[in-house]
Image (tube, rainbow, N blue to C red):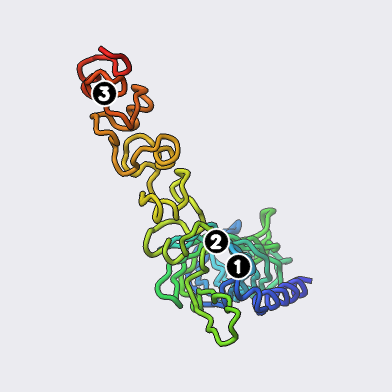
Amino acid sequence: MGFRIIIICLALFFVNTSSPTQAQNAEVWNGGIRVGQLHADTELQDHYGINAYAFVRGSIKRYILLELSAGYGQYEGIGYNTDIWLGELKFVFKPWRGRRVHPLVYLGTGLTWHNIQQFSPQSTPDAKKTGWTPIIPSGFGFQFPITKHIRFELLGGYTYTYRDDLNSAIIVKGNDGFFHWTAGFTFGQYIKPRPPKSTPKSKKIPILESIDDDKDGLTDQEELNIYRTNPDQSDTDKDGLTDYEEVRQYFTNPNMLDSDADGLIDSEEVRAYKTNPHKSDTDGDGLSDGQEVFTYRTDPLNPDTDGDGMSDGEEVIKGRDPLKKD
C-alpha cells in the first residue's frame, strides 16, 4: 500500500511540473544532496550515526514544493547497530523568502527498510532482523542562495517510525524514531520564464522568481535587490502605503512606518494631514508634526495656528496656549 501511494504521488508530481501552464507559475526542477547525522530515539542508550540523502524537488503551488528523496542512516546505540534505508515523499513549505535566506518547513510520509547488523544484549526474541515500516518525517530549515543555480541548505527534524524493534529490543511500549540534521546543496534553475508575447518570434526572457508576486507595482527583482522590501507583501512596513507608492510616488522609506520619525506614519502624513513625510516639522515652527497633531492640537501646516504673531513652538516654550491669541 505504501508503494502505491508513493507511485500515485509521483505521477501527480510529474503531471504538475511538466505542463507548460504550470511551468510559468512554478520553479523548474531542482535537486541535490545532504549529509549529516541522526540520533536514535529508543528505550536503550542511543547515540549519533551517519545520515545522507539525495533528492529531487519541484513546485506544485506558489509556496509549496514536492520532494522525493532517498537516504541512508546508521541507527546506533550502545550494543546495537542498524542500517536503515529511507524513501520519503515530503511537502516542503516556504513561509516567506528574503534576499539572503529562505525558511523551509516540511512534513511527509515514506518507507524505511532496516537491517540489524549488531543485536543489543537486551534484544528480545520477537525483534526482526530486517523489515519494512512506514515513517513520518517532519522538520524545518533554511536555504541560502549562493548563485542563480546553487543554494546551500540546512535542515533538521524528527522522523517517527511504526516499529519498536529498530534497536533489536522491544522493552518499553512506544515506537522508535530518530532526530536528524543535514547540510548540503541544491542545484537547478530558480527562475520563471516570462509568458511569451503575441508575436511568435518573441523570446522568453527569464527573470528572478516572477514579475511581481505581490502586485504592488515593483518587480520581485527590484524588491529583493534594490529596495530590500518583501516581494510577498505589497506594504512591507505596514504604514498604509504600498511599496510602489513609497518608492515611486512619495519617495519615502518602504521599510519604515515613519520615514521622518516625527510621530506620524507616512500614510497619515500624505493622506490625512497633508504634511511632508520627509520633514519632521513641516511648517518650521519648532514643533514636530506628531507633537502638533497629537499633543498640542495645533495645525502642522501653519506655524502660527492662532494668528497672534508668535509661532506655535515659541508659545509652547513660553508656556502660552498656541490655540488662543495672547
Location of mark 3 (residue): 312
The count of marks equals: 3
Q: Are marks 2 and 3 in contact (CB under 8 Å)?
A: no
- The quarter of the image holding the C terminus is top left
Q: Nearer the viewer, mark 2 or mark 3?
A: 3
Mark 1 to mark 3 CA distance (whole Å) = 59 Å
Lower sequence index among marks 1 and 3:
1
Q: How far from the left and from the top, in percent, is residue 325?
A: 28, 14
Query: Is 55 located above or below residue 269 in the figure?
Result: below
Q: Give the residue at x 46% y 78%.
A: 149
Question: Is residue 304 depicted above or below 137 in this figure?
Answer: above
Element type at mark 3: helix
5 displayed left or right of 231: right
Under circle 2, the secondary element is loop
Q: Is residue 125 above or below residue 189?
A: above
Of residues 57 and 308, the one nearer the viewer is 308
Q: Residue at x 43, y 41 (%)?
A: 267
**Residue at coordinates 51% horizontally, 74% vertically from top-left?**
191
Give the labeled residue for mark 1: 65
Tell me the kind of residue under disc 3. Asp
The picture quadrant where one finds residue 174 is bottom right
Point out the tag, 2 or 1, that comes first from the N-terminus.
1
Looking at this view, name the residue that lies furthest to the right: 1
Which of these two is toward me, 275 or 214? 275
Q: Position of residue 307 (x, y in %)?
A: 28, 20
| The N terminus, quarter of image | bottom right
Q: Is 64 left or right of 237, judged from the image as shown?
A: right
Are the residues at dot 2 and dot 1 in contact (C-beta closer than 8 Å)? yes
Which of labels 1 and 3 is toward the front? 3
Label 1: few (<14), some or many (≥20) within 10 Å?
Answer: many
In the rendering, at what x and y percent does residue 289 appear?
33, 32
Q: Residues within 10 Å of mark 3 (few under 14, many from 20)?
A: many
